[in-house]
Image: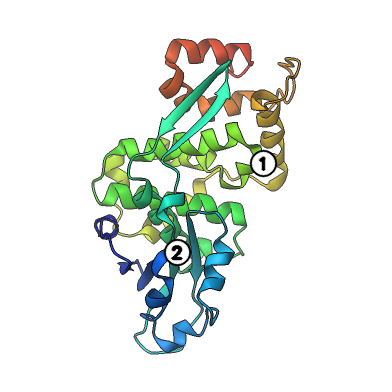
Amino acid sequence: MILETLLIASAWFWAPMPQGQALVCQTSHIKECLAQLPPEARAQFPLNSQTLVSQMGRRGAMVRPLGDLGVTNLSVTGLVLLAEARIPKSYSALWNGQVYALPIAQAKQMTLAHELGHLAVSRSRSTYLQVDKLTPYQHEWLADFYLLWSLAKADWPETLAWQQYHRRNLEVFENVKAISHWSTPMLSQLLTRYSWQALGAFEDFDSLIDAIYPDLVQYDQETLDEFASLLHRVFGAATQAKLPHYMFWRRPEMGVIIRPTLNHLMGEQAADRWLTEQAMQGE
């Protein structure tokens, strides 16, 4: 089970994947970790291991899929780099004149599972993920789908799934540039359709994708840009006049998506008042 592997505290280890396995490296031991790769796989990464660390920048994690190795029975899906000290342990955002904070439980495991999700998506055998080239945004929410499926499959608490949901909302509240990772419009559909037990009952990730993908409401870049503009208007740090009719056609849908996070951090009564003030209550 994938989540069981995430508990291993080591300079490097192999994480089992739906197809094959991924090498997980701590950046502090990058050179010795890369040495664990078979030669055909190692050749796909820079000769100087510190180049990968430089590419990672200030991020807490980075994933690098592997191409076809051309070797029978050699199934290495990719590489995940972790810089644990840079993985956030909490998120916060300012609205309603107050800073709301969300502590993150199991931060390393959650981050790693999301990165492994990118590899699972890249290696997916579902026809829905192979017909057209996925956009970066699709890759992000699909990786979060993998994260939630992994949690449910391993019988971890559903609260961790909602933690990921709230985290994605807080990220865009604080900085609208995080719209590229704003998976909550898709996670909302997943969590509405399946109970936690039903989600964990899928034998593998591709089975989940085959079942839900045709019925998902997806968002093109124009729609995401509209949401981003509304988020900036409502949560932006700059003092702006209240314009409750700005992007009025997106406000009710936005209210549905962010309500669970507002309820969690503000309480239901305060969330109701705030959503009403923002014309996000819907009909």
How far apart marks 1 and 2 lie (CA) works out to 29 Å
Which image quarter holds the N terminus? Answer: bottom left
Q: Residue at x 45, y 87 (%)?
A: 40
Instruction: Give coordinates of residue 3: x percent, y percent.
Output: 28, 55
N-terminal-most mark, 1 or 2: 2
Q: Residue at x 41, y 65 (%)?
A: 28
Colouring rule applied to residues: rainbow
Instruction: Give coordinates of residue 26: x percent, y percent.
Output: 39, 64
Q: Is residue 262 above or below residue 46?
A: above
Residue 81 got which mark? Answer: 2
Instruction: Give coordinates of residue 179: x percent, y percent.
Output: 62, 42
Which image quarter holds the C terminus? Answer: top right
Q: Nearer the viewer, residue 58 or 134?
A: 58
Q: Residue at x 71, y 22 (%)?
A: 248
Query: Element type at marker 1?
Result: helix
Query: Element type at marker 2?
Result: strand
Q: Is residue 157 above or below residue 64?
A: above
Disc 1 versus disc 2: nearer the observer: 2
Mark 1 neighbour density, 10 Å: few (under 14) some (14–19) many (20 or more): some
Mark 2 neighbour density, 10 Å: few (under 14) some (14–19) many (20 or more): many
Residue on which the image places disc 1:
224
Q: Is residue 192 above or below residue 204?
A: above
Q: Amino acid at mark 2?
A: Leu
Q: Residue at x 71, y 16 (%)?
A: 244
Q: Amino acid at mark 1?
A: Leu
Q: How many marks?
A: 2
Left or right: residue 271 compared with residue 11: right
The quarter holding residue 176 reads top right
The quarter holding residue 245 reads top right
